[in-house]
Image (cartoon, rainbow, N blue to C red):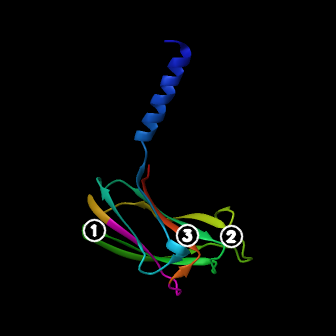
Amino acid sequence: MNKLNSVFLFLVALIMFSGCMSNEVLDVNQSIADNSWAYAKSLKATVEVKAANQPYQIRFRLRHTTDYRYANLYVMVHLKGNGLQKSTRYQFKLAKADGEWLGQGSGDIYTNTFPLLSNFRFPKAGKYEIEIEQNMRDNPLLGISDIGLSISKQQ
């Protein structure tokens, strides 16, 4: 085997090994039909926790259009399972005071990722359900194109 083949095989093995070592436990996205996020269209996901002593990072992802009318967004996050029942209201800033959008923009769509819980430890191993619902006065809330949730193991 020549040196080039050895290097190629090493790189392939390294890529495969790094994919197996991913800290991502859950990654879900939900498109919002007609960019109208209704109260009834919450994002629901189930995660299976294998070790209660493992710390996790839980994040909320949002994509909105420039048609979104507000500088902030309120959401309710419900976490339940194995005796845990926790609901928290979050406020996320989407624009500066002068109206300039925060996050990463591409055309008329902006993407933001917000931390929900950092260094969070589930009380027991088992299945947990996480639900995220919009908590604004408008129903439906216009200008929201996608919502998502990711849970990863923290080191």
- Contact flag, marks 1 and 3 (Cβ < 8 Å): no
Count of marks placed on residues: 3
x then y, percent, for residue 126: 26, 59
Instruction: Name the N-terminal-most of marks 1 and 2.
Output: 1
x then y, percent, for residue 80: 31, 70
Q: Residue at x 50, y 85 (%)?
A: 139
For residue 25, side relative to residue 144 (left or right) = left
Mark 1–mark 3 Cα distance, whole angstroms, equals 29 Å
Judging by the rendered image, the residue that carries numbered circle 3 is: 145
Mark 3–mark 2 Cα distance, whole angstroms, equals 15 Å
* Residue 81, numbered circle: 1
Instruction: Name the N-terminal-most of marks 1 and 3.
Output: 1
Q: Quadrant of residue 112?
A: bottom right
Q: Secondary structure at mark 2?
A: loop
Residue situated in front as seen by the camera: 135 or 146 = 146
For residue 142, side relative to residue 12 (left or right) = right
Nearer the viewer's eye, disc 1 or disc 2?
A: 2
Nearer the viewer's eye, disc 3 or disc 2?
A: 3
x then y, percent, for residue 99: 72, 76
Magenta stretch? 129-139
Q: Amino acid at mark 2?
A: Trp
Q: Secondary structure at mark 3?
A: strand
For the residue carrying disc 3, how many other residues have a C-alpha within 10 Å: few (<14), some (14-19), or many (20+)? many
Residue situated in front as seen by the camera: 137 or 153 = 137
For the residue carrying disc 1, how many other residues have a C-alpha within 10 Å: few (<14), some (14-19), or many (20+)? some
Q: Residue at x 28, y 61 (%)?
A: 127
Nearer the viewer's eye, disc 1 or disc 3?
A: 3
